[in-house]
Amino acid sequence: MWSIASCLALCVLAGLASGLDGENGMKYGAAPRPYTAARGTLSTAASIVTHFGSPAIDCACGYVLSAHSDAYFPLLKEITFASMPDIPGSEFDALGLEVGRWSIGCNYEGTRSVGSVDNVYVKNAVLELRVPGGQSVGGSISAAEVLLKDTITGGVFTMEAKLGGNKGTCQSILTFHTNDGSGNSDEQDIEIIGSKGADDGMPPVIELTNWNPAGKDNSHQSNPFPANPIDSFHNYTIAWLPNATTYQFDGQQLKAPAMYRSVNPSRLIMNNWSNGSPGFTLGPPAADNLMQGDQLTQLSQIGPILLPKPSGTRTPSGVLDPVSL
């Protein structure tokens, strides 16, 4: 367990090591600082920066997110692939990532996706999640999934991603409840579904789904894409907040599902998969479908409840304001 003293020391060391700064950047200090996850403001000064703050309420480390109703989270993990060499999926453990080697998504008429370590890698300074082209329906389809190792109970998660344009997969960013045998089904999804794509591969909508933690029903909402997601990188954000789960595209608020939010410990997952279903993923793709990631940021907490902010937080103006708990 981290003491408050070690928490403060790590705040300072992390800031010195990473050189993160700027009005909208990640700022380290003895008190929580504002953090805005806006596209183009995330630092690429370091490949991996993990900020450890004690989950105790009296710990002075942490972050206040002004773009998310001043929500407070004590932990930061940022993985920037742009400064990395080529890395095979078999070595992702050192990045704090786990490569899925199990069934992904749902089965369709005997066809299922199975994650392979060969389909997840860093190449040319970009994370790639690949569904190889030329596969057939029936049996297993080789696909890709990667998870952050942390099990968390709330946070704001942003992936800067470029979607693959070859139709025939479901490309997803989601939080999913850990498989602990409890029967809980917490899940919060951003999905781009192959069956709804145009002939040129351009998907018309972002699909958002919140699953009932205590049941099998869900709440769903579609949003039109504000920009072309296959031509360039864009920020996709899931904000799992104390009273709601919200979603953003390049910092623009999306219309969220009307019901449900996760309440049980979960992990952040990114995947690209196909089951050949004509009403969902289509495919498998004729040519490789590559979902690419440039940067992954997770501001989060670990604990049974979403924590209130400490007794003092730094506002965007830099003035220390007391907060009543």
Image (cartoon, helix red, strand yellow):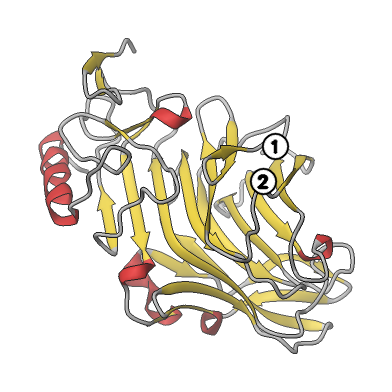
Q: Is residue 306 visible?
A: no
Which one is nearer the viewer's eye here, 291 or 25?
A: 25
Residue at 39% of width from left, 38% of height from top?
36
What's the amino acid at mark 1? Ala
| Residue 71 position in % (x across, y down) | 42, 28
In-image side of 182 versus 25 (left or right): right
Q: Categorize mark 2 by other alpha carbons within 10 Å: few (<14), some (14-19), many (20+).
A: many
- Please say if 51 is above or below 117: above
Question: Quadrant where the N terminus lies?
Answer: top left
How far is mark 2 from mark 1, CA to CA? 6 Å
Residue at 55% of width from left, 70% of height from top?
100
Residue that mark 2 sits on: 185
- For the residue labelled by badge 1, is the local secondary structure a helix, a strand or a loop? loop
Sequence-first tag of 2 and 1: 2
- Please say if 11 is above or below 258: below
Residue that mark 1 sits on: 214
| Residue 88 position in % (x across, y down) | 42, 82
Question: Quadrant where the C terminus lies?
Answer: top left
Q: Which mark is residue 31?
A: none
| Residue 126 position in % (x across, y down) | 44, 73
- Discs 2, 1 touching: Cβ within 8 Å: yes
What's the amino acid at mark 2? Ser
Residue at 83% of width from left, 64% of height from top?
195
Residue at far top of view: 324
- For the residue labelled by badge 2, is the local secondary structure a helix, a strand or a loop? loop
Q: Is residue 193 visible?
A: yes
